[in-house]
Amino acid sequence: MFKKDSLIKNISVLVTGTVIAQIIPVALQPILKRLFTPEDFGVFEIYLKTLGILFVIFAMKYDMAIILPKNKIKALLILSLSISFALFFTLISYLLLLFFDTEIMNLLRFPIKYKIALYLLPLSTLFFSGFNAFNYLLIRNKKFKASSINKINRRASEGISQIGLAYSPILKHIGLFIGNMLGNVIYFLSAYYQSFKGFKFDKRFFNPRTLLHISKEYSDLPKYNIIPELLNAGFFAALSFLVLSKFNIQEVGYMELTQRILAIPTAFIAYSVGQVLLQKTSELVNTKQKLTPEIKKVFLLLLAMVLPFIFIILFFSAPIFSFAFGKEWVISGLYAKYLVVFYAMGFLISPLSQTLISLQKFKINAIWKIGRFILIIPIFFISFEKIDSYLITYSILGIVSYIIYFIIIFYHSKKFDKTLQ
């Protein structure tokens, strides 16, 4: 069934690179967890969640459109537009920090010793936004191998930097943050080089009128994606921010490890599969071919990948976490049991959601993301005595939202297929 299939081949290339890239930080975690404290990782987790929220704003979601147009010049114009917005919001971020850094630190509950990390945040988000846009261009051009190599380079440079900085008496407390930024910079430079090696720039890429025209043509992306994507980022950030508000920064640190391990099959492999599926389904829509067979194929492939992971976490997470990261981190293993099914659902459904982008169902995608955030609002007003109860409640609500998402995706794919008959 899967032999000589271009979709599966491209997924394999991306997933192989992604798996290697994830082996690096996972392999380094036993070292890092012994070099940095739960408080360091707690603040770092809040930093990363904030970066994720800023990322939604920086590129105004125009990067999602880089794969869509048939015309290569138009795709490059969208890339230029995305980078322009990212630069603009970086400047705005530093102006806000200049006048309100104390208030922002209090809002994020950053201890004073991590103040420098706050100033690294906009710059790191800029490079993160940049490499994400360039990565879409690589996927559009079917440079899947290059995309995979970039992931490996990013994680290797990030991990090595963090370990090295852990031995610096001056920079140790912000070593995690500097390492993360360096990884983003390496990815950005590599993706830039691979995208434009031997390419001559067209002056239209920097023409304000042309960029304004492109922004209007694809205005549905920010119009129907900014708020939903912010709420989507807020949905995942709530897991850490609510732990911070209801418990303490050390608990956030334990949650950081839990989420990092659970994100190995979810956030990263699923992201790669989703990018390939976006390219493939966009091609199928443009050539008027059926979508449902490809969706079923990817779903079965993902299901086969995630089932063993669920089993391992449910029955062996506590001893594995204790052995790998130290006895102090066994708490992270216990938390993983409460969240693994929710993360598994994200692994299965999130890549399939790219089909809605290919079908340009931006409104429907937006409505679901808004609805999912509304679903967890009651958690903000419930007082939880134990973190276990909070995690279980959050997980159940997330699972329900993904089931609804799957039904929506499958319905619109079938609806498109029927128009071809």
Image (tube, helix red, strand yellow):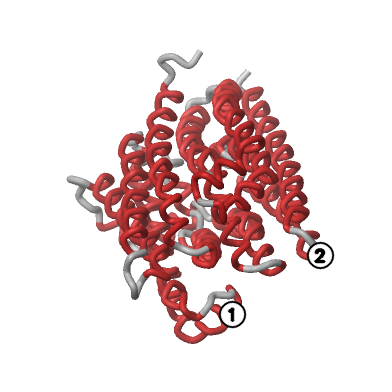
**What residue does disc 2 label?**
383
Q: Position of residue 284 (x, y in %)?
A: 50, 27
Q: Position of residue 323 (x, y in %)?
A: 52, 44
Helix or strand or loop: what does disc 2 sit on? loop
> What is the crowding at mark 1: few (fewer than 14 residues within 10 Å), some, or many (at least 20)?
few
Helix or strand or loop: what does disc 1 sit on? helix
**What residue does disc 1 label?**
106
Q: Is residue 207 above or below residue 369?
A: below
**Between 188 and 266, which is closer to the camera in this rendering?**
266
Q: Quadrant of residue 308?
A: top right
> What is the crowding at mark 2: few (fewer than 14 residues within 10 Å), some, or many (at least 20)?
few
Q: Residue at x 74, y 39 (%)?
A: 404
Q: Is residue 279 left or right of residue 375?
A: left
Can residue 223 be seen here? no
**Between 264 and 330, which is closer to the camera in this rendering?**
330
- The residue type indicated by label 2 comes to Ser
Q: Position of residue 329 (x, y in %)?
A: 56, 53
